[in-house]
Image (cartoon, coloured by chain):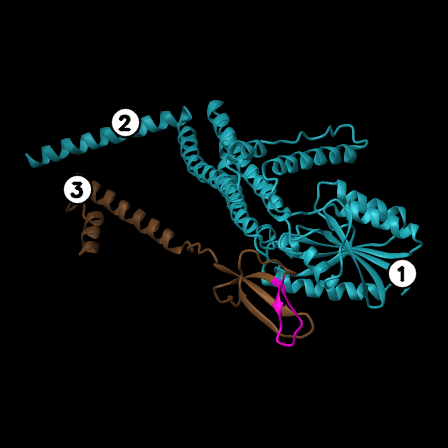
């Protein structure tokens, strides 16, 4: 229908639409096209998502391979003695680090 | 009848369009487009300026709250004094003794800020005082960024300098991102967590294995250990307080002491965090020659001069990370990278005779690392 009107408009000497309507139609079409492009631009821009991290504290025993990981607590620092291991040796904080909550993306 | 009405409307539309086109055409010649563009840029800058102002205010408030929790009743004047503290750059056109002059200025600043904190919080622990000093530094940096951006915007508007406004608008996303990172870093410091920049001190901590630290310079300690049968001296900033120490002075003093004792020094290794290039992996390590230390000059030159004076090979190992990763909580990749650094140090140690000693300086902030 639309194509038929457009075709008649261009190929028929008289034209089926009065000039003022023709102008309005053009403006409406332009506005629709611009809105469509703007919408597409917004849709294609990747949303910025800030990566979420959690701080972990890694505790180790001085003379064995025993390790345990827990959430960071205020007052923790690397080298802090935090108790005794089952074998009786000293338990200390070996590392404090951030780990990402989101699974790592593969390239 | 209908045709006449239609024709009249068409004539009006044509006349109005031509008039509008003429007006726009004349305005283009008068520079309206530029003025409009400057208006749009200024509006964008103002929106981002609000973000910067909020970041500065938030960090000031957080610092004040932290000091109040430590028992200070009204820390506002003290925080404002520290935030607005400035250092005047030494004269650069006469380079003679510029490093010594720079060192004097840095020492003056350090002593003054430490004095302000000591006076305000006499009963706070060393760690708490160091955190207050760092929080003041971060708040000061954010305050300066906000004020300077505001200054550039007002200057640009007053002088109608659209190039200045355009440059500011283009640079602002990066500036805001950095300011936001600084703001996040404040929380990390207030919690006392180790930061990415602590890769050097963490390497030393792992090598030292709870040996007794001895002071070698202000806020700087060293440990004695053995690596692959060679005696090794490990230097780092004292921890777990927020502090970078004086590794340059530490290396210089230690080398002098060892030479006096008749020890032969086989090599000096500096371990530091370094900015990675975009696309590089966090925690990647690399070796090179020179002093890996990012200070403005005084500490680095001490290491270089000492190595040159006593003809000691000077090696550097860097752990790569982004600017953001360097000042935020240490990532697991960086923690793991320190194990690779230790392997590299062991490799290096095998290249010197067993009767030689080595010095390893772990450069960086030792917050959260004993």
Locate residue B231 relative to residue B327 in the image: left or right: right
Please state the horizontal and vertical placement of residue B182, each as a whole percent of the image.
54, 45
Closest to the observer, B253 or B352: B253
Whole-angstrom CA distance, mark 2 to mark 1, is 90 Å
Q: Residues within 10 Å of mark 3 (few under 14, many from 20)?
A: few
Q: Is residue B346 above or below residue B365?
A: below
Q: Nearer the viewer, residue A68 or B101?
A: A68
Q: Chain of mark 3?
A: A
Q: Residue A87 versus residue B344: which sits nearer the camera?
A: A87
Say if the magenta span includes residue A54.
Answer: no
The picture's colour for chain A is brown
At a point 67% along the width and 72% down the height, the residue shown is: A89
Q: Which chain is cyan?
A: B
Q: Residue drawn 75% across and 61% down?
A: B211
B21 vs B119, nearest the viewer: B119
Report the residue marked by disc 3.
A21
Graded by Cα atoms within 10 Å as few (under 14), some (14 to 19) or many (20 or more), the crowding at tag 1 reads some
The region drawn magenta spans: A81-95
What's the CA distance linking mark 3 and mark 1? 95 Å
**Label 2 sits on residue:** B19
Which residue in the protein does label 1 denote? B356
């Amino acid at each position: 229908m639309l194509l038929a009107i457009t075709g008649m408009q261009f190929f028929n000497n008289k034209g089926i639409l009065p000039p003022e309507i023709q102008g309005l139609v053009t403006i409406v079409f332009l506005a629709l096209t611009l809105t469509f492009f703007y919408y597409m631009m917004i849709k294609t821009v990747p949303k910025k998502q800030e990566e979420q991290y959690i701080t972990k504290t890694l505790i180790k025993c001085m003379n064995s391979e025993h390790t345990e990981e827990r959430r960071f607590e205020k007052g923790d620092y690397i080298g802090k003695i935090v108790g005794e291991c089952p074998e009786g040796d000293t338990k200390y904080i070996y590392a404090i680090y951030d780990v990402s909550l989101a699974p790592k993306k593969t390239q | 009848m209908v045709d006449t009405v239609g024709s009249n409307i068409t004539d009006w539309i044509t006349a109005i369009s031509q008039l509008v086109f003429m007006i726009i055409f004349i305005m283009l010649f008068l520079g309206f487009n530029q003025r409009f563009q400057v208006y749009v840029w200024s509006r964008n800058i103002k929106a981002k300026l609000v973000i910067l102002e909020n970041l500065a205010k938030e960090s000031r408030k957080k610092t004040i709250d932290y000091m109040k929790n430590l028992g200070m009743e009204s820390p506002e004047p003290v925080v404002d004094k520290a935030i607005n503290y400035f250092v005047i750059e030494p004269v650069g056109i006469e380079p003679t003794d510029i490093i010594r002059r720079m060192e004097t200025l840095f020492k003056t600043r350090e002593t003054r800020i430490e004095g302000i904190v000591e006076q305000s919080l006499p009963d706070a622990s060393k760690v708490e005082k160091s955190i207050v000093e760092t929080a003041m530094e971060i708040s000061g940096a954010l305050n300066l960024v906000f004020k300077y951006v505001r200054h550039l915007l007002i200057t640009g508007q007053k002088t109608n300098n659209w190039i200045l406004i355009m440059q500011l608008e283009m640079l602002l996303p990066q500036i805001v991102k950095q300011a936001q990172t600084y703001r996040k870093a404040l929380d990390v410091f207030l919690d006392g967590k180790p930061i990415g920049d602590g890769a050097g001190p963490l390497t030393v901590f792992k090598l030292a294995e709870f040996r007794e630290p001895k002071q070698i310079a202000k806020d700087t300690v060293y440990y004695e250990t053995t690596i692959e049968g060679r005696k090794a001296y490990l230097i780092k900033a004292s921890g777990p307080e927020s502090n970078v120490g004086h590794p340059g002075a530490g290396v210089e003093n230690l080398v002098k002491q060892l030479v006096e004792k008749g020890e032969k020094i086989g090599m000096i290794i500096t371990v530091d965090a370094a900015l990675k290039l975009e696309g590089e992996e966090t925690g990647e390590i690399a070796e090179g020659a020179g002093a890996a230390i990012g200070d403005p000059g005084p500490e680095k030159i001490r290491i270089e001069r000492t190595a040159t004076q006593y003809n000691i090979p000077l090696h550097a190992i860097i752990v790569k990370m982004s600017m953001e990763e360097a000042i935020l909580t240490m990532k697991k990749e960086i923690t793991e990278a320190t194990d690779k650094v230790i392997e590299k140090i062991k490799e290096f140690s095998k290249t010197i005779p067993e009767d030689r000693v080595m010095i390893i300086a772990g450069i960086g902030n030792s917050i959260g690392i004993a």
